[in-house]
Amino acid sequence: MTHPFLDLAPLTAAHFAAIERRVAGLLATGQDVVIMQGEALLPLEGCIRGGARPGSTALNVVTGPYGQTFGNWLRDCGAEVVDLAVPFHSAVTADQVAQALAEHPEIDFVSLVHAEAATGNTNPVAEIGEVVRAHGALFMLDAVASVGAEPLLPDVWGVDLCVIGAQKAMGGPAGVSAVSVSERAWERMAGNPQAPRHSYLSLLDWKARWIDGGRKALPHAPAQLEMLALEACVERIEAEGLDTLTARHAAAAAATRAGAVALGAGLEPYVHDARDAAPVATTLRVPAGTDASALVAKALAGDPSLPLIAGGGALSTEMIRVNHYGVDATRAAVHASLAALGAALAEAGREADFEGARNAVSETWPND
Ligand SMILES: *Cc1c(COP(=O)(O)O)cnc(C)c1O
């Protein structure tokens, strides 16, 4: 008997190219799209190592933990790095980016994270893109946590390298990822003697061996199961409608924020201004004297399927993330998450307004 995962016919080049086109459609991009055969950190590192070199100066916007990683890669490539860091409970503004560019006219590369799932903030990429375009720097965007959760228009916004993964709002696999590459970005990499070549990190290899050859032959055996899962996930998004999907995430974020405030019990939105809050996930600050990891553990003991996790690293004591993305961008998941957090806080001696939270969620995200 054939096994549903194991005994598949090889993925053809034509099939691979068709999946690539559908991913390009999701990004509304006319640029080349490369589907990298690994998690999104692969194209992110590939973009930075392809674009940065000794002699270049990069503006690295740090609004969460990924920005710190990018800065390390940029320095490792020998680039001068100007870090523009803002508190993780806020977003960077286009004015701040413009000021940094004005102070350092030599900047030729800008890296930015669109939405930060880890800290729950999102940045105004359309406005920032205008500023970066006017300056002329190459613009790399990490859109892993925004794709599917909020509007993402790399071509309109002047993004030269837009990296996405399917594992968050798209509700897809984590093992493959994609990047759109502008003509300018190809030129930058081609002119960079240090850009990875003959390497798993290399975007130029994909251009030479796949795109320039007319997408007739794959450079190596693709991650077949992940590619099929990516196709299924894009199909499901097309069926729901991308706008419906992003609206569902925006509603989940607004409802979670309103519900948490109404629940009280000392919980507070971690991102101060609702305008800066990411649709992909809502982060909450726990009351002083309680431990976020312990509260999450208690909440999950009742229902391990809830999309709750404590913040990473230093935030593990003070922050709770409600990961209402993908299949969890539902009213049911929001209601259940808040109820479980309320119960855990009540056990810790806090007063939780369960009914108020339920009402706030229902009012913010009414049934249609
Ligand atoms: C999730 C995410 C990634 C991918 O990293 P994983 O933690 O391995 O899923 C990259 N960038 C951002 C902004 C993300 O939110």
Image: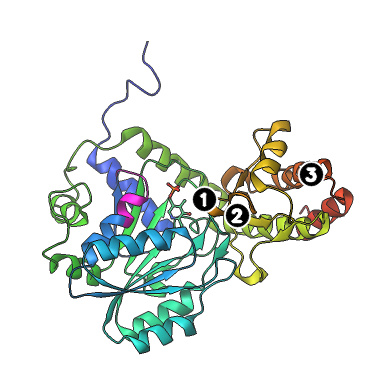
Q: Position of residue 61 (x, y in %)?
A: 42, 71
Q: Earlier in the sequence, mark 3 or mark 1?
A: 1
Q: Residues within 10 Å of mark 3 (few under 14, many from 20)?
A: many
State the CA–CA distance, disc 1 to disc 2.
17 Å
Residue most extreme to the front: 289
Q: Does residue 363 appear to the left or right of 123 in the view shown?
A: right
**In what element is the residue under mark 2?**
loop
Which quadrant does the N terminus fall into? top left
What is the basis of the colouring in this image?
A: rainbow
Q: Earlier in the sequence, mark 2 or mark 3?
A: 2
State the CA–CA distance, disc 3 to disc 1.
26 Å
Above or below, comparing residue 137 to residue 144 in the picture: below
The residue positioned 51% from the left and 70% from the top of the image is: 123
Q: Name the residue nearer the viewer: 33 or 122.
A: 122
Q: Which residues are magenta?
A: 37-44
**In what element is the residue under mark 3?**
helix
Figure label count: 3
Residue most extreme to the top: 1
The residue positioned 49% from the left and 56% from the top of the image is: 145
Q: Is residue 27 in view from this perspective? A: no
What residue would you read off at disc 2? 281
Which label number is shown at residue 313?
Answer: 1
Q: Is mark 1 within 8 Å of ligand 1?
A: no
Q: Position of residue 99 (x, y in %)?
A: 42, 87
What residue would you read off at disc 3? 339
> What's the residue type where badge 1 is placed?
Gly
The image quadrant of residue 67 is bottom left
Q: Earlier in the sequence, mark 1 or mark 2?
A: 2
Q: Position of residue 126 (x, y in %)?
A: 47, 75
> What's the residue type where badge 3 is placed?
Ala
